[in-house]
Image (spheres, rainbow, N blue to C red):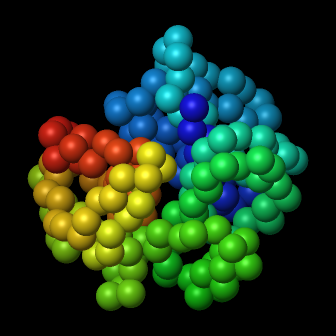
C-alpha cells in the first residue's frame, strides 16, 4: 500500500478531500484523518491522510503532496521509497521542501517544473510531463504530453498532483483513458 500524505493549511481539508475523491476513481483507497476513517474497498492500494493527523508514519512507499507550507510535524520513518509533489507557485514552499531532501516533482506553470499544463479548457486539459520520472516500481516514464478529458472544472494544482500520483504509481494510461 502506498501512503499519500498531504501537507496543506491546518484545518483546510478541501484539497485532500478533492484529491481523495479523484483517486477513488483509479484506486481502492483508505482515507483517514484524526476524525474519520473511510474505506472504498477491501484491499486498499492507497492510504490518503493529511500531515496534521499523525506524528509518525512507517511505510514502505510514501508520496508527500505539498500544497502549502503547513507545519509538518509528521516524521516519515522507514520509507523505502519517498517522493514529494510540490506546488511550485511558492518560492518559500520550494525552499521548505528542499530541506526535506526528498526527491521532488514540481507542478506549476513555470518552465522549470516537472509537470505543467499545456492547455486547460472546459472539456479537457493537456498535462505536459517535461522530464522523465522514475515510478515507485523503478520504471521510467519519458517526457510527453498527455491529453485528458475533464468531467468538470478542476483546480490546476489538484489536476497536476493527480497526474503525478498516477505517473508515480505506473498508471499513466489512466490519464489518457477517461474522465478525470
Residue depicted at x 25% and y 41%: 174
Residue 114's x, y, as percent? Answer: 38, 74
Relative to the observer, which residue lies in front, 103 or 40? 103
Q: Residue furthest top?
A: 42
Q: Is residue 122 visible?
A: no
Residue depicted at x 47% and y 69%: 105
Relative to the observer, which residue lies in front, 72 or 34? 72
Residue 11's x, y, as percent? Answer: 73, 51
Asked if residue 170 lies left or right of residue 177, the reply is: right
Q: Is residue 136 visible?
A: yes
- Viewport quadrant of the C terminus: top left
- Viewport quadrant of the N terminus: top right
Height in image: 159 above or below 68? Answer: above
Height in image: 68 above or below 59? Answer: below
Residue 173's x, y, as percent? Answer: 21, 44
Residue depicted at x 60% and y 81%: 94
Relative to the observer, which residue lies in front, 138 or 61? 138
Q: Residue furthest front?
A: 138
Image-quadrant location for residue 46? top right
Residue depicted at x 66% and y 49%: 80
Image-quadrant location for residue 25? top left
Relative to the observer, which residue lies in front, 165 or 21? 165
Total residue callouts: 0
Asked if residue 65 lies left or right of residue 56, the reply is: left
Amino acid at each position: 500500500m502506498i501512503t499519500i500524505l498531504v501537507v496543506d493549511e491546518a484545518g483546510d481539508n478541501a484539497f485532500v478531500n478533492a484529491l481523495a475523491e479523484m483517486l477513488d476513481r483509479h484506486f481502492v483507497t483508505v482515507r483517514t484523518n484524526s476524525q474519520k476513517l473511510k474505506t472504498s474497498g477491501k484491499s486498499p492500494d492507497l492510504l490518503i491522510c493529511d500531515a496534521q493527523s499523525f506524528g509518525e508514519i512507517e511505510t514502505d512507499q510514501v508520496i508527500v503532496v505539498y500544497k502549502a507550507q503547513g507545519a509538518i510535524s509528521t516524521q516519515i520513518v522507514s520509507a523505502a521509497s519517498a517522493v514529494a509533489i510540490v506546488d511550485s507557485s511558492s518560492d518559500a514552499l520550494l525552499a521548505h521542501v528542499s530541506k526535506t531532501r526528498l526527491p521532488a516533482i514540481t507542478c506549476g506553470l513555470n518552465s522549470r517544473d516537472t509537470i505543467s499544463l499545456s492547455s486547460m479548457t472546459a472539456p479537457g486539459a493537456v498535462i505536459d510531463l517535461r522530464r522523465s520520472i522514475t515510478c515507485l516500481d523503478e520504471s521510467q516514464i519519458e517526457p510527453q504530453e498527455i491529453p485528458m478529458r475533464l468531467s468538470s472544472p478542476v483546480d490546476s494544482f489538484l489536476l497536476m498532483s493527480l497526474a503525478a500520483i498516477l505517473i508515480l504509481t505506473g498508471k499513466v494510461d489512466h490519464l489518457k483513458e477517461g474522465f478525470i
